[in-house]
Image (cartoon, helix red, strand yellow):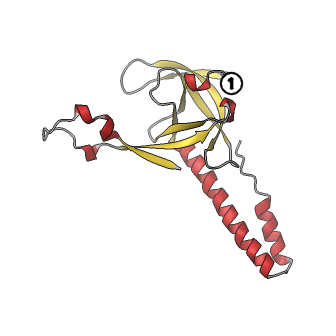
Amino acid sequence: TTREVEVSNVLHTSVSNDSNCANYSDFATLKYMDIVIPEIDGKIISSLSDSGAEICVIKSSILDGSSVLPIGKVRLRGLVGQPVDAELINLTVRLADNEDCWTTVLFAKCSDVNEDCILTAEVVTRLTDMYNHKVMLVEASNVIDSTDSANDDNDDEEAHDSYIDVDCIDN
């Protein structure tokens, strides 16, 4: 569910062969994951997974035409430059390849951002855990289904029902 982009490709023009400069291998690999937000017509958004981010950020233009209302304001301060004011909004999010598990995420909506969407490590973990939990439930349910068909004993029926009743929605 994630893909990596080499930062060295982006910084190619600023790195020289001088031994005092960083090697291409010294740059971090950027990680992206595709998410879906129903408030913007279920469009797939490539989102940067940023382990150093303190709040999720979404580019204002991504939300053009949506009726999402702000719930507050925040001032974003980056490594360089002046702080930027942004509106706070709640959006429902899921991984693009996990149609069953949604969660609500607080975002700062900002026009002055280079990425369409930036996710915190906590949100990335929440989304991937929900995805992994769903996969485990499907695999466990399949094992129980095969046991049920091979063995008509009603004792296995209770275990099967406990997997069906699990709700992936995290609010």
Task: Mark 1: give few (<14), some (14-19) or many (20+) Cα within 10 Å.
Answer: few
Residue at image point 24% right, 32% down: 13
Q: For this view, does 27 lie left or right of residue 95? A: left
Given the current orientation, which residue lies at the most extreme left position?
Answer: 19
Above or below, 157 against 110 in this view is below
- Measured as percent of width and height from the top left, residue 148 is found at 79, 76
Q: For this view, does 45 lie left or right of residue 136? A: left
Residue at image point 85% right, 81% down: 153
Above or below, 109 against 5 in this view is above
- The amino acid on which the numbered mark 1 sits, given as a three-letter code, is Val
Q: Quadrant of residue 31?
A: top left
- Measured as percent of width and height from the top left, residue 128 is found at 57, 51
Residue at image point 69% right, 68% down: 140
| Pointer 1 residue | 68
Residue at image point 21% right, 35% down: 15
Q: Secondary structure at mark 1?
A: loop
Q: Give the quarter of the figure containing the C terminus.
A: top right
| Nearer-the-camera pick, 158 or 54 | 158
- Measured as percent of width and height from the top left, residue 64 is found at 62, 21
Above or below, 146 against 90 in this view is below
